[in-house]
Image (cartoon, rainbow, N blue to C red):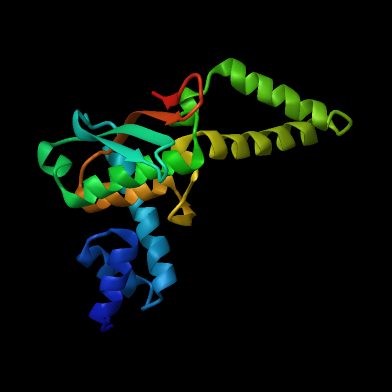
Amino acid sequence: MDIDPKQVQALREKTGAGMMDCKRALIEAKGNAAEAEVILRKKGIAFAQGRASRVASEGCIASYIHHGSKLGVLVEVNCETDFVARNDQFRELVKEIAQQIAATNPRWIRREDVPADVIAAERDIYAAQVKDKPPAAVEKICQGKLEKFFSTVCLIEQPFVKNPDITVKEHIAQKIAALGENIVVRRFVRWQLGEELPASGS
């Protein structure tokens, strides 16, 4: 079927995927832009997973100072080559991640970084809140609350502030698909005026 080039361009601008990938997704979705976006998201995540084991030792460090100069962020994001590290799409992604950290104040990058004692303490609190329910229900509720906890305190599991329909992880996956390299958030530090210690992820 014929696909309007303007539709392809609009999908590209929204997802960051390549032109041909957008066109193929629109053809597969029979011109339905929303369905094509879902197709690209799924392919992007799969593409990202296939590159997760590749070494990302290049990249850049970005800073973000919020209006009023009372909050600042430094973040390091890695990619595979210096070529991509200098790419505008990659640089924009790093800037967006810094802004995300400023806006949402995550404590860790991914759930694997959360200390076991913190998870155990959270689970105990949730279990105490529903202690009168059957054990199976308690476990299900606790797991659901833990997922919500991770989506709040872990950077890559948070809803992306510029598009809350996707997570930061999914947004990064789209850029991995577009740039063809593994991209990893390495570490960050977030300062707020008056805080004794900055919130940080590593």
Outermost residue, left side:
83
Q: Is residue 91 left or right of residue 199?
A: left
Residue 29 location (% of width, % of height): 38, 72
154 is higher (above) or lower (below) than 68: above
Rendering quarter of residue 61: top left
The answer to whether residue 46 is seen in the rendering is no
Report the residue that reaches farthest toward the front.
68
Residue at 53%, 18% in the rendered image: 115
**Is residue 5 depicted above or below 196 in this figure?**
below
Is 198 on the left or on the right of 175, as rendered? right
Q: Residue at x 50, y 29 (%)?
A: 107
Q: Residue furthest top?
A: 117
Q: Dividing the image into 4 quarters, which one contains the N terminus?
A: bottom left
184 vs 140, nearest the viewer? 184
Q: Which quadrant holds residue 124?
A: top right
Q: Position of residue 128 (x, y in %)?
A: 81, 26
Q: Quadrant of residue 30?
A: bottom left
Indicate the position of residue 84 as horizontal and vertical percent values.
Answer: 15, 43
Looking at the image, which residue is at 37% across and 50% down? 171
Query: Residue 93 location in percent, x, y?
Result: 29, 47
Residue at x 27%, y 82% (from the top left corner): 4
Q: Is residue 150 shown left or right of residue 15?
A: right
Please indicate, yes or no, whether residue 75 appears anywhere in the rendered image: yes
Total label count? 0
Q: Quadrant of the C terminus?
A: top left
